[in-house]
Structures are given as structure tokens and as C-alpha cells.
Amino acid sequence: MTSTYNTRQLEPPSQAPPLGSELFNLKVMRFPQPSLKTNANVIGMLNEGELLADERAAEGHTYHTCDSISSALGLVSERKKVYLGENSRMCVIITHNSNYAVSSVGVRIEVQTQKSRQILVDSMQSPRDLNAGQTFDYFLDFKLRDPGENALVCCVFYRDEDNQIKNFQKFFRFAVDEPFRVDTKLIGELGGSDTCMLAQIALTNLSADNILIEDLSFGSKGSVVASEVKPDGTAPKTSLVKPQSVQCFGFRLNSSDQKDKRRGGELGSIEIRWRRAGHVGVLRTKSLNLPDNQKHPRCTLRAVDAPGSVFLESVFHVTLEVECFSPKPVHVRLSMTSHKHLSIIAAGRADLSCGVLSQGQKKRIEIALMPLALGIQRIAGFKLKCPNIGWSADYDNLHQVCVMKHGATAEEKKAE
């Protein structure tokens, strides 16, 4: 937030001195910002190849061509909506309307919401005298922190001719909307190098304008390490999201400390940087937390022995390891439930008892599975539960295998 102080002398009015609230006139204006608004192809109008080759462009001179894009430069309307996370730029002009001076003039300007109070200007400790026709100009630049109804409160304190302390105040109300809806989903278990959790993020543009996403990052906490998941060859991180459109992002989360996940549930938050019609905004979401069954897990499940490739509709075996962390002995069961992929199913019993396990005890179980689809498939759909204490955890990505046709050659296997 920045503010500047300036005074300017106007011709004093010829009418009689005003009384009451007419002593001061207070006006607030928003600063519209320039933006490109055109239906034409701006890149084509620039004719970039010839422009860069022009000697005058290389020398840095300004010149005019028949392909000028000055008609594409417009101003944002003052009544246009404002959004959470953007910087609001306003000019507050306080005009002294009387023909006599007032002393000890102090100004306080703040933004109030139901949740917070943000002081922008406070000159109460250093008041100034205001002569007839003189004005105070304040240029404000502050962050919009709370959605919903916001109020810009302007208060002027002064002493009149009788040395009496008086004040004049005015309220300017405006609404702040949310630019995005951020939906998140956590898949898998937070673990070390052999296991990971996938954070899926769906960003919906709720504004009426196109929004350019300049950066979307995951600010991890504690021992959580986040890495972006994206298709190969997609170097640019920026993306244009149209109104009511959805843009998806993904992050792979690992823990550098296997025990850290049992001491706290915070994973981190998502920071979004964007531009909209010349406005720049930054938003940070609330912290993502581990599911309740992973904050203090009673048991964990991982694959310790599994093949890298298998044949279609042929039974193969996987060895799973259950580790108990419960302070008291618990009865543990392992079951394989139906899931949306249905690419690998159980070839034998789908509900097994692991017996009673004590803290620190491990138990290995071998299960038979059968793949039903070709390609890279996930071993998923497992549920680990302790019926006596009502605890359970789902595992949607224990291991991945390459499923091939029968009789596939080494070259075909490598290609798949």
C-alpha cells in the first residue's frame, strides 16, 4: 500500500461560508488501467518479422506505420468489477469549500470488511492547516483481501474558528468478487521415494473476463516436497482461461521424512498469479491437509515385490507389506474393492485377514491379480482397515505394471 500527499491552491469561492458537512467535499475515483481490446489479430497487424528487421526499430526510435494498433488500446471502465487478490488503485480528493482557514486537519482513510480493517492513510499525529480553497489529494494502492462487501471509510478531523474539534466522514461501498473457484483432490498416500500423493487442482474462471494464469505453484510445508505434473514438452507455464472455463493442474507430493506425516496434517498451499485486463492479482489458498486417516495412521500398506510387466488375462502375484503404528494391538484386514479403472482385478480372495498386529510389527501378504487391459495399469483399489477401532485407509496407486499381449517380443515390450 502506498499513498502520497499533495496540496494545490484553488480560487476561493465567492459565496457565503458553508455550514456543517458542506465545509468539505470528498470525492473518490478509481484508476482505470489500459488494456488491449480488439477483434483483430494483433500479431498479424504487427507484422513481427519486418518490424524486427527495420533499422529504426533496432535504433529504438518511435515511428508510425499503416499497421498501427493504437485503436486497440482502451481503458477499463470505472464500474468494472474488482476481484479478490488484485490491487485497487484509488484517488481520494478532499476539497475545502469555505473562504476561511481551518486548523489541525487530520485525515484517516481505511478499508473495512466484516473480517478485517486495513488503515491506508493516518495523518492524525501530524495534522496540517488547510487554507480556503485548498485540497488534499491521496493516491492509494492497496490489496483487496476479503471478498464481499468492502467499505472505504474517509474521516476528516479539524478545528473550526471557535477552536472546537469537529469531524466529517464519508463511506464508499464496493463489492469484491472471487475470480476463481479452486477445487482440490488428494489421491494416494504421502510417503517417501517409493510412494507419493497426487494433488489435483481444478481452476474455474468465475469472472467475466479472460484471465492469463502467469504462475501456479505449490508452497509446501515441513518435509513435503512438491513437483509439478505435466505432459512432456509443455515448457510454458502460462495459460489463458476463458470465463466459466476450467484449467487443471497437478502436483506430486512426497515426504522426505517418513515419520513427519504422523506429526501434522498440513501439506501446503497453492499460490496463483494472474493478469486480467491490465490488473495483476495474487491469491493463496488455505492450506491443504492430509486426510484424517493419514494424519495419525494406525497401519500403512506398500508393495514390496511386484513384476514390472505382465501378460493380459494372466494371473500374476504381488507381495504387500502391512506395518502397524498403533500404540495398542489391533486386528487388521485387507480387502480389494472395485474402483473406476477396473484394469486389474483380484484372481483369488479379495478380503484377507492380517491377524492382530502390535506397534512396529510388519506382515507380508501375497495376493493373486489378473490384468484386463493393455498398457501401463495401476494396482489400486485396496482398503486397509481396523474394524475394532473404526479406522480405514484407501490405496489407489500401490504399483504400476506394463500389461502386454501374449507372445510379445522384446522390441514390442520396449515400445509399449
Image: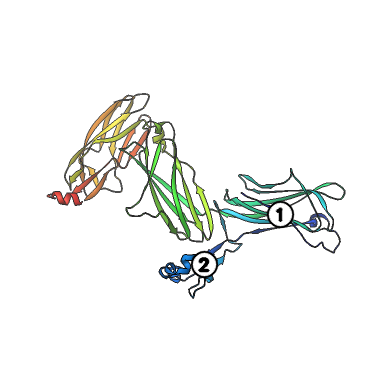
Residue 214: horizontal and vertical position, in percent? 46, 54
Residue 34: horizontal and vertical position, in percent? 56, 63
Identify residue for label 1.
Answer: 6
**Is the residue under label 1 in contact with that under label 2 (CB below 8 Å)?**
no
Q: On the picture, is 365 further left or further right than 385? A: left
At label 1, the amino acid type is Asn
Residue ranking furthest to the left: 407
Quarter assignment of residue 393: top left
Residue at image position (71%, 54%) is 6
Residue at image position (61%, 55%) is 89
Residue 1: horizontal and vertical position, in percent? 61, 49
Q: Nearer the viewer, mark 2 or mark 1?
A: 2
Q: On the picture, is 217 further left or further right than 314? A: right
- In the rendered view, would you say 243 is above or below 121? below
Is residue 236 or residue 218 the one in the foreground? 236
Cα separation between marks 2 and 1: 35 Å
Residue 73: horizontal and vertical position, in percent? 54, 67
At label 2, the amino acid type is His
Question: Quick one: SS at disc 2?
Answer: loop
Identify residue for label 2.
Answer: 61
User: Residue 229 got which mark?
Assistant: none
Q: Is residue 10 visible?
A: yes
Residue ranking furthest to the bottom: 66
Question: Quick one: SS at disc 1?
Answer: strand
Q: Which of marks 2 and 1 is nearer the N terminus?
A: 1
Q: How crowded is mark 1: few (under 14 residues within 10 Å), some or many (20 or more)?
A: few
Residue at image position (52%, 68%) is 62
Q: On the picture, is 57 further left or further right than 234? A: right
Q: How many marks?
A: 2
Q: Is residue 245 visible?
A: no
